[in-house]
Image (cartoon, rainbow, N blue to C red):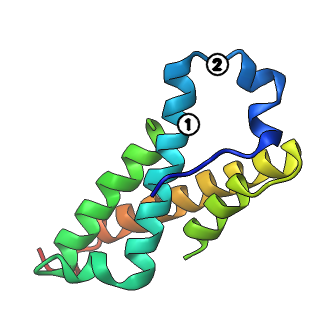
Amino acid sequence: MSIKLPAVITGCDEYETLAEEERAALVRRLEDALDLGVSLASGERKNGYPDFFQFVEALEQDASHLQEFTLPLVSAVDGVTSATEYGAAMAHQIALDILLGKVLSACYKLRLNGLVPR
């Protein structure tokens, strides 16, 4: 999926100071978060794993990657890309980070739970 950043982001001073690679990384991060959210919401992602533990393990890795480098996950990305004010765009970006953090927390809890089959 290709995401186009709204003018409230591309026209702000902070965005202007970013190198081209940093701008591309921001767009990639939003696209990856959107893809993750769509695959979770559709159930497609879960169906691709033979058991729940492997599903959670892969989800943990992907969410960790998104948060560190590059459902409501989906609406938060939509909120960033359709924002008409800079503050709203940043609020949705923060919400996206919080949601990814919650996914990671759930994955960590499941990984530590001895009742989850391995």
- The residue labelled by disc 2 is 18
| Direction from residue 75 to residue 55 in the image, left or right | left
Of 113 and 100, nearer the camera is: 100
Mark 1 or mark 2: which comes first in sequence?
Answer: 2
Query: What residue lies at 34% left-to-right and 84% top-to-bottom?
Result: 43
Against 57, residue 97 (above or below) is: above
* Image-quadrant location for residue 42: bottom left
Residue nearer the viewer, 91 or 17? 17
Q: Residue at x 64, y 18 (%)?
A: 18
Instruction: Evaluate if marks 1 and 2 touch, with contact meaning CB atoms under 8 Å apart.
Output: yes
Q: Residues within 10 Å of mark 2 (few under 14, many from 20)?
A: few
Relative to residue 33, is residue 19 depicted above or below? above
Instruction: List x then y, in percent, for residue 4.
Output: 62, 47
- Mark drawn on residue 26: 1
Amino acid residing under circle 1: Leu
Which quadrant of the figure has residue 114? bottom left
Q: Secondary structure at mark 2?
A: loop
Please name the residue shown 72% across and 61% down the image. 79
Residue type (three-letter) at the residue carrying disc 2: Leu
Asked whether, in this view, residue 40 is left or right of residue 88, the answer is left
Secondary structure at badge 1 equals helix
Q: Is residue 15 left or right of residue 62?
A: right
The quadrant in which the N terminus is found is: bottom left
- Count of numbered circles on the image: 2
In this rendered view, identify the residue nearer to me: 90 or 13. 13
